[in-house]
Image (tube, rainbow, N blue to C red):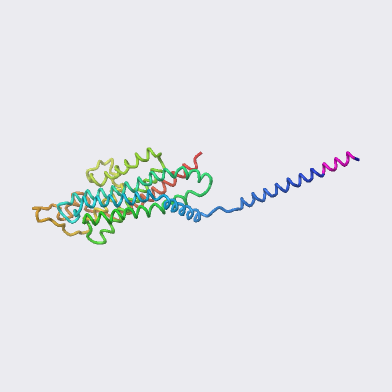
Amino acid sequence: MMESYSIGGKAEEMCKLQKQNEATDNSSYEEGDIFSKTKPASLVMQFLLLFYRNLLMTRRNYFLLFCRIFAHATVATLFGYLYSGVGPNANQVLANYVYLYGSMLMMVYTGKMAVVLSFQIEMESLMREHFNRWYKLGPYFLSVLVLEIPVQIFCSLIYVVISYHLTGNYVNFERFCIFALFCVAGSICAQSWGFFVGATLSVKLAVFIGPILAVLFSVFGFCTRYIDITPVFKWMWHISYYRASFHGILNSVYGMNRDDLHCPETQIYCHFKNPVLFQKDMDIEHVDMQSNFVLIMLIIITMYISTVFVLWYKLNKR
């Protein structure tokens, strides 16, 4: 009797343990089922959250933004006083030409180098957070663009407004708008190149390759005319966003049927009193501004798409 009782007690205990295990398995299954049924955040919500995070980070660490604004305002004031009043004078056309070249170079370098360095710093956190599936690549890159593009436009306009008026280039509002448009477009195009270089290369190479590309594209359109370029490199002239932007601002200043420039009484002869003569010498007499602007926009879109593909490859390679 005692043996049968002990056997029955053990059987009851085993049944209880089995029921407890089944209950635990069911509860864990229900929890897993709940988590599996939880929907991830939509792409729009991911973009909004990432954009808000970027705004919050910029507000807390505003030193970089302050440096960019301060640099544009300082260089604009410096250029404005170095080339003060050269705009309307026929005997200072070459000085104004150098100012326009320096302005375009300023837009290109500040647009490109600011994101080359900052984007490299964010790559480590991007790879970690994307690996943990916090968000998709598309909303992340779009949130970066929506923040960076307005900042660069604002900084570029600060430079344009200050330097353009100090140099005396203001003739009418239409010319000023075209000048500002091509300066901003060239800066945004350089920024798109900065994203691509920063995403593709390491920090050491990006800091070296970025300026080299800027100088390479600036050669075609400033110091060499199209007829003087070796046929092997003429394709560089056609795809140079710097050339397209630079010719756009040159045409806004000296083209569009501008009246004769002012020749001081102390000057016996002003060769470039008629702006058309200067345009002929610089081989920019016939500038298709619409085609140049379309070229800049196409390059911007192409570089953004290329940057996304590079990031996708880096995030998904094993």
Residue 3 on the magenta segment: yes
| Identity of the residue drawn at 48% across and 48% down | 137
Residue 306 on the magenta segment: no
| Viewer-proximal residue among 125 and 131 | 125
Farthest right residue? 1
Task: Give the percent coordinates (x, y) of residue 295.
Answer: 33, 51
Q: In this view, does 274 lie to the left or right of 117?
A: left
- Asked if residue 226 shows in the view, the reply is no
Answer above or below: position of 289 versus 232: below
Quadrant (top left, top right, bottom left, bottom right) of the N terminus = top right
Task: Give the percent coordinates (x, y) of residue 21.
Answer: 73, 45
| Identity of the residue drawn at 52% across and 48% down | 134
Which secondary structure class fits the magenta region best?
A: helix
Farthest bottom residue? 173
| Viewer-proximal residue among 56 and 290 | 56
- Asked if residue 160 shows in the view, the reply is yes
Task: Give the percent coordinates (x, y) of residue 174.
Answer: 26, 61
Answer above or below: position of 210 versus 172: above
Task: Give the percent coordinates (x, y) of residue 205.
Answer: 37, 38
Q: In this view, does 121 lie to the left or right of 318?
A: left
Answer above or below: position of 16 versus 49: above
| Identity of the residue drawn at 28% across and 41% down | 233
Magenta region: 2-11
